[in-house]
Image (spheres, rainbow, N blue to C red):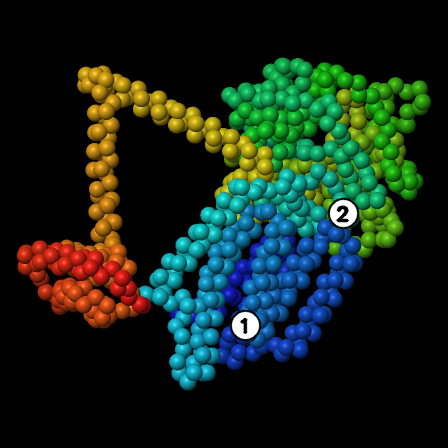
Amino acid sequence: MTLLRQYRFASFMLVLVSIIAFSIATVDFAQLFLAVTLAMVSWYITEGPRGRTLPHWLSNTIIVALLAWVGLGFLRSGELSGAVAALGRFLLWLLIIKLYSRPTVHEERQRLSLATMLVIAGCLESVQFAFGALVVLYVALAVWTAMLWRLHRSYERGRSSRAATQGFAPPLELAFGRRATPQFRGMTVISVLFVFVASAGVFLLFPRIPTMLDTRGPRGARSVSGFSDEISLRGGDRISESRRELFVVRWLDPTGEPVLPARPLLLRGAVLDRYDPAGERWLSARSVTGVRTIRTPAEQAFVSLGSGGADAPASLHTAEFEMRALATDVVFTLYAPVALSTTDSRTVSFDPATYLIRDASSNRASRYWSYSLRVQPQPAGGVLEGLSGGATNSPRALQMPVPEIRGIAEQILVEARKSVNLPPEPGPDAGDAERFVYQREVARGVADWMQRSFTYTTDLSSIVKVTGEDPIVSFLTRYRRGHCEYFASGLCAVLRSLGIESRIITGYIAMEFDESTGLYTVRESNAHAWVEVRTGPYAWTAVDATPEDSLRELQEQNRSFADNFRWLYGTVEFLWNSRVVSYDSTTQAAIADRVQSGWRTTIGEWMTALNDSLSALTTRLSLGQAGGAWLAAIGVGVLAAALAPTLLLLRRRRIRDALKLDGVPRARRRVFLREASFYAEALSELSRAGIAKPDHVTPREHARMLAERNPEAGRVFAAVAEEFYRIRFGAWTPPAEHAGEMKSRIFALRQALRQNPAAKMAD
């Protein structure tokens, strides 16, 4: 395929990559399949033997209908956060329509512009590694396509000029030399490398804004991890079922042996204790007051998170975490962590009110890779008091700001009592212990009733939102189906309406256990939400209303053969998220400080070692005070000896380029370099005199033109050129005395050029 024919294919591939990239960014695989299929069909229809295209009026009509459809869809959803996704979908389908249009210059420019805008829209929607790899591919392909575009446009202008001037056409802009295709490819490779190097420099100099690290994907879900530190019940119609492997967990008993717990591991990431009815979402109302900062040791030793020691009770279990694709500052924990160790020394923050841990290291050049927790499965009161710091933590009522749920909660409690023997509500004089038992049993009873009466599903697209009705009310009374976020929201709302202190926890549920390795595999689809109920002065008990059997069934349905190999991709994605996505001004400062201090230390060590070595050598050789000068002279000699081969290689390369030896066999090339080097010297003399021979002018013709301005120089160069012709093209082997004769002619040429320096040649 010639360079001119490659342009059509390159431009189509550029559009195809942009479509795939945006669909991956929005995690819309139905859109990906449909758009790629229509794009492939367009290639067959428009580039096939018949070359069919859409009429101009029909394509404009479809574009107007598309604009109206996307605009109405965006207005109907009413979410500003979906504006970029809506714009991207419009650009994608507009690009598909342009593929079916007639390939004029105007249409081709629009296609390339739309493809670029589509990739930019994807950049605002996702930071996943798969999308980043497609962006890199798109940039490289865009450079190649842009260069082919210039060549293609030059060819088209040449055809127009030929028609206007009866056969004569100017040369193509980018066709140069005798091997245009390899040279064009080489120039493309150099251009792509330059673009990537420049992009890397811009990335290092201008880091991401920290607020951009919370990029959210479609439907409000975090595009990086699937875990969210809030729950939004508005707009989302489906949660992630991605099988991406985020991290693995090994659960060890007090003796250090891997064991399988009776229940799945609930890994806590965020505590949500405030419901916003206007935004229909759960948020965290915690402040930084009382948060402690802890530095973990570098030798992977455990550091205590509370006032007690890290090694105390013998009933402590250990949870070992190893990241695969997830790079975050959230340290996922079980309830309740007693001690922590990390592979490298890091600074973490510990909240005594929630028992949550965050990575607060100032050196954020990379996220943590692995860590270990010591946990007491049934924490005693003294352990929890030590974690809380002994601060007063009296029970408090958390109100539910949706009055309608009060009546619904009382009716649900009546229904739950029919199947579960629940204790009576404590009286005004009841003690805290009685109230805590009541809260725990009611929470478990209501959760059991919801598991039997409600249906778990990840797809809520068929549910119609009732205007003016809170989504929790709709879930409890109207639909009674949803995913874990609705189950947790419904249970917490019912308990709070009954005066029971409760809160929502978001994180992951570890269910997939490999007996051969003793590891839990936590995937993106394992993002989970559940409820914790107050059951003591410092104690909270986890209560999960989501049917566990439904979660296991869904996980088995999504299991595939590719799960065995996802860890390979996960490791690369972790490096991407920790080194690229999380790169901000803090990371930039840490890297700069590390590089600066590292160079200073390294150079100082090198200079000290060199000085010590020279001093020892001077003493050994008994060179006295002049030893430094002798060693400096020896060093200059060694440097000159090392530079000599390099200078010789550069001279041979200059001669080879002057003799045009590309494509000549290696054996003949060495002969020409040895016997015809005088011609390269002659060309160098002409270049220094300002009358260099142009590439398109033959040596004989240049000698004739030179003789018109400087007869003596033209005569000498003509003789040199004839000798060059005899050796290069006449297979003549010169005698030994030929080299001396050519040196004399080069000297004569130099003298002739000095006598008439003003004789300049025109190209």
Residue 461 lies left or right of residue 170; in this view the side is right
Which sits in the foreground, 417 or 474? 474
Q: Which residue is mark 1?
A: 105
Above or below, 502 against 230 in this view is above
Dot 1 or dot 2: first in sequence order is 1
- Can residue 544 be seen by looking at this rendering? no
**Picture quadrant of residue 384:** top right
Kind of residue sitting beneath label 1: Val
User: Residue 179: where, in percent of width, then height?
Assistant: 32, 65
Q: CA separation, marks 1 and 2?
A: 51 Å
Q: Residue at x 80, y 27 (%)?
A: 534
Image quadrant holding the N terminus, namely: bottom left
Q: What amino acid is labelled 2 in the image? A: Gly
- Between residue 166 and residue 495, name the one nearer to us: 166
Where residue 473 sits in the image (x, y, percent)? 86, 45
Residue 500 vs residue 150, the one in the foreground: 150
Looking at the image, residue 519 sits to the left or right of residue 740; the answer is right
| Element marked by disc 2 | strand
| Mark 1 crowdedness (10 Å alpha carbons): few <14, some 14-19, many ≥20 | few
Q: Quadrant of the C terminus?
A: bottom left
- At 52% from the left and 22% from the top, the residue drawn is 298
Against 156, residue 619 (above or below) is: above
Q: Which residue is mark 2?
A: 482
Q: Residue at x 62, y 44 (%)?
A: 224
The answer to whether residue 465 is left or right of residue 112 is right
The picture quadrant where one finds residue 336 is top right
Mark identifier at residue 207: none
Q: Is residue 296 visible?
A: yes
Determine whether, in the image, residue 75 is placed left or right of residue 712: right
